[in-house]
Image (cartoon, rainbow, N blue to C red):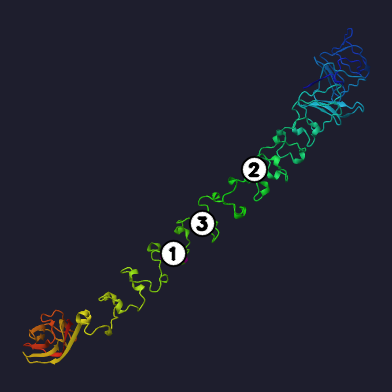
Amino acid sequence: MRSISKFGVLTVLLIFYSLVISSSAQAVSSYSVNQIPIFNHGIDSYADTNLYSSLNLYGHTIDFKKGGSTIKEDDQLRISTDDFLYLNAPGKTFVQNDLSVGNTLTIANNKLGIDTGSKLYDDGHLHLATDDFLYLDAPKTVFVKKGLDVADGFTVTSGTISLPTGSVTGGMIASGAIDASDLASSAVTTTKIADAAITSAKFAAGAIESASVADGSVTTAKLADSAVTAVKISDGTITTDDIAADTIAAVDIVADGVGTSEIADGVVTTTDIATDTIAAVDIAAGGVASSEILDDSVASVDILLDTIAAVDIAAGGVASSEILDNSIASADILDDTIAAVDIAAGGVASAEILDDSVASVDILLDTIVAADIAAGGVATSEILDATIATADLADGAATAVKLSTAARRQVVSVQIGDVALSIGATLERPIFVASGNGTITAISFTNASNITGAANLGTLSVERKTATAVTVDSLALTTSMTAYTAARDTTPVAGTALAAGDVYSFKYVQGSTGVALDEMLVTIEYTVSE
C-alpha cells in the first residue's frame, strides 16, 4: 500500500482535545499525572463523560456499542466503523507522519460538505479522481518524475510545462497542431519530410539553388519556354541531339563556321553550292560519277585520250556515227552478236564464211541450186528419206545394188495343179526363166490337201536346166505336208546363183507307193543383183 504524508484530511488523531463518550459514568481504575489508565473496565452509559487528560488503551478496546465503531491500541491505534468516519475538527486536521489508506480516500466538497466523487485510491496504480476539474495548486513547480499519460484534454492556464527530452511522441500530437511558430530554426530535416510532400507552392521565389538540384533532374518539362538563354549554356556542350531538326538557320552560323566535319556525308545538294564555285581541287579522285554530270554536257575535250573503257559506255551507247569508218576489227565484235540486219545485202562472201560453219538454218529454203553443190557433194545423209522421185534419177542410174534388200527381193509362184501319176512315173515342167542376175534365197512347196509322210511316196524338186544342170532344192515326201501351208526351205542346196536366161523347172518323181498332188504350188524367192 502507498503512504501519503502531510495531507490536510486525516483519519487518525493521536491527541484528542475533545472526545464525547456515550456513557453517564467516569471510569477510573488508576490514574497518574497527565494520564488516565483504563484496565478491565467497560464504559457503557449514554451520559456524557469528559476526559481532560490522557486515555491509555494499550491492549484494550473501546466499543461504542453502536454501528460497530471501536478504538483499539495493540502497538497500532485502530479506529474502526461500519459506515463513515468523520473527523469534524473546526480547524485543520494534521497528520504528522505518513498516512496509509487501505482502500479509497474520499474527499468531500469543502463548500457543500458532501461527497462529489473526488477520491484517492490504489488498485495497483494510484488514482486521483474528481467529477469536475483537478487543480494542482502548488505555489511553485509541479514535478512529474517519469511519464505522464493524459487520456483526454490537458490544459495549462498559465506558466509552462517542462517535459523530459524525447518524452512527447507523434501519437500525443493532434493532426495539424504544430505550426511554423512551434518549430525551431533548422528543426525540419530531410528525414522529417515525407517523400513527394514538398510542392512548388512551398518554395519561396529564388529559394532553389544549383546545389539543391540533383544532377540530371531538370528535364525539358521542368523548363519554362525560352528559359534557357545563351548564358545558361556551357560552351561546347550543345550536341546535335540537343538541336531540333531543321532549326539552325544561316544567321546562327558564324562565317566559315561550317567545315567538312560539320557536314553530314551526302547531304550537300546543288542548291547549297554557289554557281561556278566547285574547282577541280574540291572534287575527290573518282568523285564525279554519272549522276553528277549533266546529261549531254561531256564533250570530247573533257575526256582524257584513250580512257573510255567498255564499262563507261551504256548498252547501245555507241551508234554508227560514233565509230570510225573501217575501224571495227574482229576483236571488237562480241562473238555471236552480228545479226542479219547488221550485214549489207551481198556483204558476206565465201571469204567471210568460216569453212564448214554454214548449217541448214543458215540457208534460205529452196535457194540451193545444182551449181551450189560440189560434184559428189550430196551423200545419202543429205537426202531426205523417200524424197527421190523417178524424175530425179538418170536413166539406168538405179541399179540393183542401189536398191534395198527388200526392194531387190523378188518372188515367183507357179501353179502346177493336180498331178496323178502311175507308180514310178516322173513329171517335170518349166516354171521360171531368170531376167537378170540374182540369188535364190528360198524354195517353197504348197499342197491343197494334207500329205502324210511315208516311205516311197516320191520326191518334189526344183531343177536348174541351163548352164550346169543341178537340183536346186528337193523335198522327200517322207515328210508330212499340211494343206495350204508352205513347206519352205531357206537353204537351197545348190545352183542358187541366177544368171539372165537361166531356166528352172518343177520335177515330181513318184515312188513305188505314190501319192497324188492336189493343186500343187511352187514358189521361188530371190534377190536381184548386177
Residue range highlighted in magenta: 321-327
- Outermost top residue: 33
| Residue 280: image location, x then y, percent | 54, 51
Q: Amino acid at mark 3?
A: Asp
- Residue bearing mark 3: 302
Q: Is residue 338 above or below residue 479?
A: above
Q: Which amino acid type corresponds to the residue marked 1 in the rendered image?
A: Leu
Report which quarter residue 217 is drawn in.
Answer: top right
Q: Name the residue rendered at 27%, 85% in the picture.
A: 391
Specify the quadrant of the image occupied by residue 366: bottom left
Q: Main secondary structure of the magenta part?
A: loop
Front position in the image: 11 or 34: 11
Element type at marker 1? Answer: loop
Determine the CA span between mark 2 and mark 1. Answer: 63 Å
Foreground of the two, 337 or 283: 283
Q: Secondary structure at mark 3?
A: helix
Position of residue 10 relative to residue 477, above or below, is: above
Q: Amino acid at mark 2?
A: Ile
Q: Position of residue 506 (x, y in %)?
A: 12, 88
Please give the label number shown on residue 238. Answer: 2
Residue 441, image x and y in percent? 16, 80
Q: Looking at the image, can residue 28 be seen?
A: yes
Relative horizontal placement of residue 305, taking residue 87 as reference (left or right) = left
Which residue does the numbered mark 1 point to in the structure image? 324
Asked whether the viewer can see residue 445, the reply is no
Q: Quadrant of residue 182?
A: top right
Counting from the top left corner in percent of width and height, residue 388 is at: 28, 81
Q: Nearer the viewer, residue 438 or 367?
A: 367
